[in-house]
Image (spheres, grey):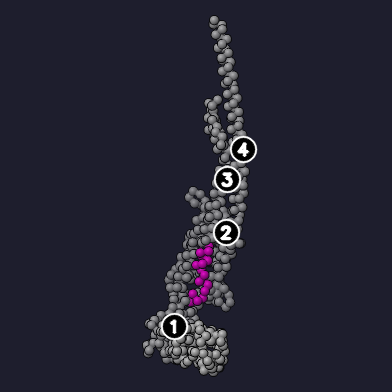
Amino acid sequence: MTISFGGLATGLDTNGIIDAIMNIERQPLVRLEKDKTWLNNRLSAFTELDTKLNSFQSAITDLGNPDVLAKRSVSLSSSDYLSATVSSEALVGTSYQVEVLDIAQVQKTVSDTGFADKTSNTFGTGTLNLTVGTTTTGIDITSANNSLEGIMQAINDAGLGLTASIINDGTASPYRLMLTGENVGTSFSLDTTGLTGGTDSLGTFTDTQAATQAHIQVDGIDIYSDSNTVSDAIPGVTLELTQVSSGNKTRVDVELSKTKIQSTIEAFAKGYNEVIQFITGQSTMGDTAPGILAGDAGINSIKRHLQNMLTEPYGNSGVFSTLSELGFETQKDGSVVVNKEKLSDAIDNNLDSVISLLAGDDGQSGLAKEFQNYLDSMTDSTNGMLAGRKEATNNNIKQIDEQIARSEERLAKREETIRAQYQAMEQLVSQWNSTGNYLMQQLDTISGLYKK
């Protein structure tokens, strides 16, 4: 970097003068930087709005779900013998007495004899006859698979509705063959007499667990199931059986989960308010300056559209056609509050109409779906509000960056030219000073001759 000592000949602060000139020359560049900052801040505001729209969309996911709006709750007098879940098809205000008489379980059979080695081919060869239900199937055992593991694999490969496995009982000859049915309807037996030769014999098998159906009584009515998950005994209620209740009965009560319904509707109001208040704060005139998004027709359009959807009647088969009838009250700032008493009354007396308005009926989508579809379009990563604003803003920022780069290059050359001009002036003044000093010396010499 060249070091410049300005003003040595003229006594002027040429560096200061040049800096002042360049500061004036840089003013358009300063304005470009401010424009770039403004655009970046504006893009950040659009991004924040997009986040709020996505949050609003997430908040109303359950609003269009009839199962959530008609949410039931189920309570048990005891959790010792069963658990329960409930759907919107359950009858509100009903109670049932449930007794668990048997738990569903599959047949399990284990070899009476244990073996020291599970990999040696020490068993006989021939045919194992496995009877499942009333069907008997022969399984070939050869010298290639007449080990305990080989026999296990041959049974599994047959695909007859049961599973063979090897257990270790911890004794000196620990390995035993176990057969387990796939479901409660699978009963089976194994005939090992078809295997001949070998030093080991599978011998006899003992049932350690019999195949049984689940058996319960609901209000004295016998109900059987191949699974411990019983979904048809009580309308809309699924019971998960855990153990026999030995004469004890469990009371099952079904009620409307009013708190869940209210919180789902109030979540809509919260998400709506966050969007409306953000748009209002970012787009209106403040005390000293307009909001960063002031003048953007797009976000004002979003606000108007959401407000219109909130207040316009929506056709359905119920008695409610607007959200205001569910207790939504619009405030002066455009936000809404939910009148809890009015909403509670609507849920208590006209729940089906609440569901019709929000979730739809007769193949027609509800108001929630209308909001979801609109928010989908606004937050679409390709064609949504942010996508369009981001592309336009980034293009403007790119153009500004290019202008700044050109301006910086021009200003560097301009400064170089000015410094060269001042340096030339300094050199000229220096020459003048040298000439003046020389002339003064000559005059002094001449004046000295005359004095003599």
Q: Which class describes the residues within 10 Å of circle 4: few (<14), some (14-19), or many (20+)?
A: few
Q: Which class describes the residues within 10 Å of circle 2: few (<14), some (14-19), or many (20+)?
A: many
Of callouts 4 and 3, the N-terminal one = 3
**The magenta stretch spans which residues?**
53-70
What is the CA distance from the residue labelled 2 to the residue labelled 4?
40 Å
Identify which residue is drawn at 44% across, 83% down: 168
Residue under label 4: 413
Q: Can you say whether 75 is above or below 56 in the image?
A: below
What is the CA distance from the residue labelled 3 to the residue labelled 2?
23 Å
Amino acid type, mark 2: Leu
Of callouts 4 and 1, the N-terminal one = 1
Residue under label 3: 32
Q: Residue 125 placed where, x, y %?
A: 55, 90
Residue under label 1: 168
Give yes or no for residue 447 being in the magenta stretch. no
- The label shown at residue 386 is 2
Of callouts 3 and 2, the N-terminal one = 3
Q: Residue 155 placed where, x, y %?
A: 54, 86
What is the CA distance from the residue labelled 1 to the residue labelled 3?
80 Å
Of callouts 2 and 4, the N-terminal one = 2
Amino acid type, mark 3: Leu
Say which element carries label 4: helix
Amino acid type, mark 4: Lys
Q: Can you say whether 373 is above or below 166 in the image?
A: above
